[in-house]
Amino acid sequence: MRIVVIGSGYVGLVSATCFAEMGHHVVCVDRDAERIARLRDGEVPIHEPGLEPLLLRNHQQGRLHFAQTLRPVLTNIDLCFIAVGTPSAPDGSADTSQVLAVAEELGRWLPQRCVVVNKSTAPVGTAERIERTIARGLTQREAGFTVPVVSNPEFLREGCAVEDFMRPDRVIIGCADDQARQTMEALYAPFLRKQPRLMVMGRREAEMSKYAANAMLATRISFMNEMASLCEQLGVDIEKVRLGVGSDSRIGYDFLYAGCGYGGSCFPKDVRALIHTAQRHGLPSHILQAVEERNTIQKAGLFVKLQQQLGALDGRTIAVWGLAFKPGTDDVREAPALQLIASLLEAGAVVQAHDPVATASVLRCVPAHWLTSGQLVLHAQDPYAVLDDADALVIPTEWKPFRQPDWQRVRGLLRQPVVIDGRNLYDPAQMQALGFHYSSFGRPS
Ligand code: UGA
């Protein structure tokens, strides 16, 4: 098939690459000229395991192309995916202006019928709005054909996006057109050979499934974080409780890890958007409000635990291991580490931070004076370099190289043996035996 994918973010780039890998002719379009130029030069703008070799190979073999303008690439296509951002608006709702702007363009330029597929996470009713917007454009220029719009929410996780896309545990197609459904079934058949779980439903149901899935996962995390707080008060170990709870086959082990809260470009935004949708329909969202509030408290937890160990933080030097919102990605959006750093700098501390891949992303998004003032120092290479003369080590992200550090070396470099573990990576008894003042989440210290 001939496919256009609009948007070269995580979802767009991974989808475009994986469709090309299955033999389709794919053009990935982004209005960001610099990003497209870099992609054409073989430079992959995001850190995503396995993406680079796949993308380069498909690009070199002529199945994957990159373009900055939409109109020229729309001729003779079968499918057009929309994978642009739907960021949080100031009121918490999902800002769908980029999606609708794309729909306007498609209405203006599409030269023939094709199936338009929305992959951007967008509120219930968006696929219908896209379809109406395109139809308006087609009518104005008396195009003489119609364009069906499908909702196909994406469930990939950053850090294992290629794997998730190539072997999805399910594909959801929200569809109101029979021919479009057949096209989507044919497209996804090779991805579902092992697990043939393609679900066809209404477009509104597909859109709602995406929000409900993310909200459910965020709820599990916030619930466990609340249990962890209680465990701390009761002298109970949340890690043992997690095993006890997860072993119930109705519950399962996934997404039960307590810690310094969830971040990323999806959970915080999608929970807020769903709360907004509920409120707009006159339904206060008791559970989701609580999920969000618990996460706000949780993200502040690293700072609070540091204060408990060190007292006033003014003039202190704090080492941080891990800046990405989770391992395996260079994405720092809504990362607990960034919130911690902002609080520390405001309190007058100096931060020396290391991340194996995300320091460049931090450089791009933090205020320049954090760096020019010397209050924030970043090291991309050596985790031990940030420990020099620090009063404490904080670990907000569970990158693998942090799992078994050389504790003697850590102990020798730190000014004070304080370790705050945002992801419950270490054994509290062992840390105590090594002479550390150690705090984690939901475990007796
Ligand atoms: C999430 C969903 O897992 C994907 O299915 C979905 O497609 C994606 O959002 C999206 O909407 O695009 P992602 O944001 O990449 O994926 O990351 P997750 O692996 O879900 O982790 C989210 C956050 O929750 C991270 O900060 C992680 O550290 C935290 N987390 C996760 C916990 O605190 N505890 C857990 O048990 C699991």
Image (cartoon, rainbow, N blue to C red):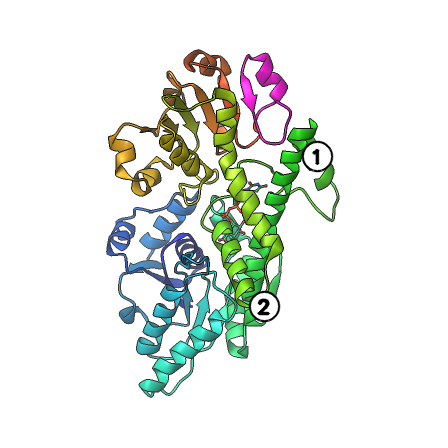
Magenta stretch bounds: 426-445
Disc 1 from disc 2: Cα separation: 35 Å
SS class, disc 2 = helix
For the N terminus, give its image quadrant: bottom left
Which residue is situated farthest in the front direction here? 312
x and y percent of residue 11 in the render?
A: 43, 55
Q: Position of residue 445 (x, y in %)?
A: 61, 22
Question: In this figure, which residue is indicated by the disc labeled 1?
Answer: 241
What amino acid is labelled 2 in the image? Glu
Q: Is mark 2 within 8 Å of ligand 1?
A: no
Splitting the image into 4 quarters, where does residue 106 fall?
Answer: bottom left
| Nearest to viewer (mark 1 / mark 2) | 1
Q: Is residue 90 magenta?
A: no
For marks 1 and 2 on the same chain, the one whose residue lies earlier in the sequence:
2
Which is nearer the eye, 136 or 1?
Answer: 136
The tally of labels here is 2
Q: Amino acid at mark 1?
A: Val
Q: What residue is disc 2 on?
A: 205
The spot of residue 253 in percent (x, y) is 67, 42
Callout 1: CB less than 8 Å from ligand 1 = no
Please tell me which residue is depicted at 47% across the width and 13% down the height of the picture.
Answer: 411
